[in-house]
Amino acid sequence: MNQDRERAPETDTQEDRHAGPAHAPRSPAPEGGPSPGGPAGGRSKGVHRPWSARRIPAAVTALVIALVTAVLLFDVVRVRTGGSAAAWRTRLADEVSSRPVDDVWMRVGAVVLVLLGLWLFVLAVTPGLRHKLPLQRADAHVRGVIDRKAAVLLLRDAAMRVPGVSAARVRVGRNRIGVRSDVRFRAPADVKADLLVALRKELDRLYLARRPRINVRARARRT
C-alpha cells in the first residue's frame, strides 16, 4: 500500500488555447517558491534585470579624463614655474577665440561632445546585460539569471523533440519568443499545436520572471 502511494503519478494540466489535449508537466513548485512560469502573460513583481558594472566604458572614460587632466596640469605648472606654454594649448586657445560659433568645425565638435554625453547618460540610467534573462526568485537576497543563448538552446531542443519537426530556429526576446520550424511529415497545424504545448512546458521549467509570448510558424518541407 505504501509503495503504491509512493508511485502515484504526478499530474497537472496546462491549458492550450490553440489545440492539443492536456499534458502532464512536472510537479508543482515547493511551498513558498515561485509558481512555474510566473503570472500568465506578465512578469514577477520586484524582479528586474541585474545592472551591468560597465567596467570597460568606466575605465576608458576615467583613463581619457586622467590623461587630459595630467597633460593640462603639467603645462599649467610649467607656465607657473617660468616656462612657456605648449604650442598645442596656445593654438587651441587661438582657434577657439577666433573661430565663429557657426563654424563647421565648431558644430562638429559640439555634436561629438553631445553624442558622447548622451552615450554616457544612457549607460548610467540603463541596466545593460541584455543577453541575460532574469529568473523568478523566492528569496529577496538571491538573484538568478539565464543566458539568452542557453534559453534558445533549451527551447530549440524542446521543439526538435516534437514529431515531424526536422529543423527549428528560435529567437528569444524580452517580450516574445519566435519559433520557425520545418515540418517533414504530419500536418503543419498539428505540429504547430504540439510545438506550442512543448514550448510552454519548457518555458515553465525556465522560471523566467517575465513570461514572453510564443509565436510559432510551421511550414511543410517535403524535400
Image: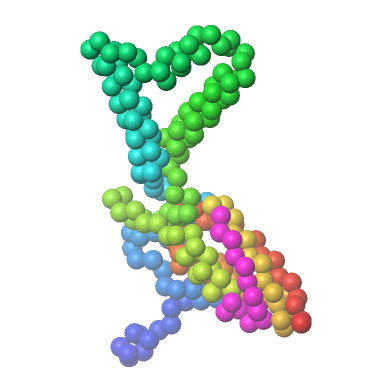
In the picture, measured across the screen, residue 195 lies left or right of residue 13, that is right
The front one of 20 and 110 is 110
- The picture places residue 73, in percent across and down from the top left corner, at 29, 20
> In which image quadrant can residue 31 be found?
bottom left
**Magenta region: which residues?**
160-173
The front one of 122 and 38 is 122
Q: Is residue 169 above or below residue 34?
A: below
> In which image quadrant can residue 100 be found?
top right
Q: Residue furthest left?
A: 81
Q: Is residue 219 magenta?
A: no
Residue at figure coordinates x 71%, y 70% from the top left:
218
In the picture, measured across the screen, residue 95 lies left or right of residue 65, that is right
Q: Is residue 47 above or below residue 199?
A: above
Residue at figure coordinates x 63%, y 65% from the top left:
179
Q: Is residue 168 above or below residue 76?
A: below
Quadrant occupied by the C terminus: bottom right
- The picture places residue 183, in percent across and down from the top left corner, at 70, 77
